[in-house]
Image: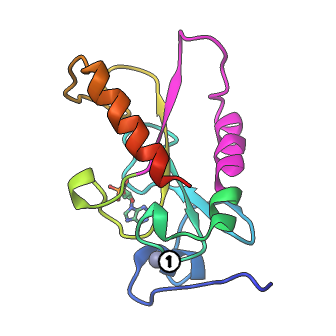
Amino acid sequence: MATAVKHEASCIFCKIIKGEIPSFKLIETTHSYSFLDIQPTSKGHLLVIPKYHGAKLHNLPDEYLHDILPIVKKLTIASGLAIDGSEGIGYNILQNNGRIAHQEVDHVHFHLIPKRDEKTGLIVGWPSENADMSELSEYAKELVSKLN
Ligand code: 5GP
Ligand code: ZN
């Protein structure tokens, strides 16, 4: 079956894929394209995108998703971030969906963000509280019932 390829003329990332606007390209495959982020939050901040215009993750055909994570892994290694153990340099893989979830470009993208210190890279702060176990159990059942 032929691979579906879908571009949106006004999309900045589709334009980058097509070479209509420049980028610092890192890797390109049939399904994916990777380049340096133009406003890095830490040195080496890069993006991996599918060569398919889907705004959110659920809009992508699985074949594009299958291609992306191995590329993220390859770039993590090339970036010198493949360090075992919990201490030292780390990294975050970030993928935002929707304006309220901090997505600015409506073409799916995975950020690879090196985390070397407290001041640069991803800074996370989310509210949390201890869960009610019976509510968790009910929710897990509900979700599982919808997965089949
Ligand atoms: P979001 O907030 O949507 O998850 O992140 C969008 C990312 O795309 C931002 O980190 C931003 O710096 C990056 N970006 C936006 N426009 C361009 C561009 O034209 N070229 C490059 N290389 N990165 C871009
Ligand atoms: Zn696009």
Left/right of residue 121 with respect to residue 68 in the rendered view: left
- Count of picture labels: 1
Residue at 74 percent of width and 66 percent of height: 29
Check disc 1 and report the residue beneath it: 53
Ligand 1 sits in quadrant: bottom left
The residue lying toward the viewer, choosing from 147 and 123, is: 147
Compared with residue 22, is residue 103 higher up or lower down, i.e. above or below?
Answer: above
Compared with residue 8, is residue 76 higher up or lower down, i.e. above or below?
Answer: above
What is the secondary structure assignment of the residue under circle 1? Answer: loop
Q: Quadrant of residue 28?
A: bottom right
Q: Position of residue 104 (x, y in %)?
A: 29, 62
Residue at 29 percent of width and 23 percent of height: 134
The residue lying toward the viewer, choosing from 148 and 84, is: 148
Left/right of residue 146 with respect to residue 130 in the rendered view: right
> Badge 1: how crowded within 10 Å, few (<14), some, or many (20+)?
many
Q: Position of residue 91 (x, y in %)?
A: 51, 30
Left/right of residue 25 with respect to residue 111 in the rendered view: right
Q: Quadrant of residue 119?
A: top left
| Magenta region includes residue 79 | yes
| Magenta region includes residue 73 | yes
Asked whether mark 1 and ligand 2 are closer than 8 Å, the reply comes as yes
Compared with residue 87, is residue 137 higher up or lower down, i.e. above or below?
Answer: below
Question: Does the rendering let one see residue 120?
Answer: no
Over which residues does the magenta segment extend?
68-95
Residue at 58 percent of width and 80 percent of height: 19
> Residue lying furthest bottom in this view?
9
Q: Position of residue 35 (x, y in %)?
A: 57, 59
In the rendered image, the quadrant that contains the C terminus is bottom right
Q: Position of residue 44 (x, y in %)?
A: 52, 41
Question: Does the rendering let one see residue 27?
Answer: yes
The residue lying toward the viewer, choosing from 21 and 49, is: 49
